[in-house]
Amino acid sequence: MKNIFQPAVTSEIIERINKLTPATTQLWGKMNVAQMLAHCNVTYEMVYDDIHPKPGPIMKFILKKLVKSKVVSEKPYPKNNQTAPPFIIKGEKDFEKEKRRLIDYINQTQQLGENHFDGKESHSFGPLAKTEWNNMFYKHLDHHLAQFGA
């Protein structure tokens, strides 16, 4: 899996994001392009912003046992995969705003570097190794950019 913490990979992802337009249509799924960008921002909101309630102990245990391995492994997500409630985006979103936010989050993550994330507590899964953080960040972005042909 590519390493999102490497500047060249970050640049590649941002180039792919910059290929999107408000009129870009999805190849599968229900979200439009602005909703997809907002959806991708949720991952970073859970890292940098305190706006999503943290799961309670029982839910966190369930997430760690049943979901974590799917999110942090190198195995790609299937098309039309089920998503967690905080990631479901309804209503219209501002394409340019969501695009700008996502690029800023990606740049911030790359600048902090993988050592910043190594052992850092995730919102839902407890502490993650830097490779798990990378897989979670990169795989999610790659999946949704491919969804829109970028």
Image (cartoon, rainbow, N blue to C red):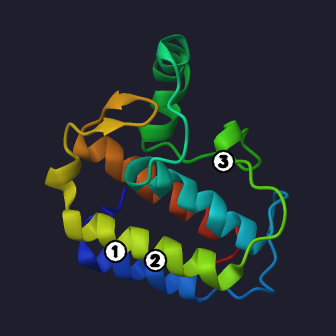
- Residue nearest the observer in this picture, 118 or 104: 104
Which amino acid, mark 3? Answer: Phe
Which amino acid, mark 1? Answer: Asn
- Residue bearing mark 1: 107
Across and down, in percent, residue 124 comes to 46, 31
- Residue nearest the observer in this picture, 148 or 62: 62
Q: Is residue 77 left or right of residue 105?
A: right
- Residue bearing mark 2: 103
What residue is rendered at 33% in x and 64% in y? 4
Look at the image and tell me whether residue 3 can be seen: yes
- Residue bearing mark 3: 87
Which amino acid, mark 2? Answer: Ile
Judged from the image, the secondary structure of the residue bearing numbered disc 1 is: helix
Across and down, in percent, residue 1 comes to 37, 55
What residue is rendered at 71% in x and 88% in y? 21
What residue is rendered at 50% in x and 42% in y? 75
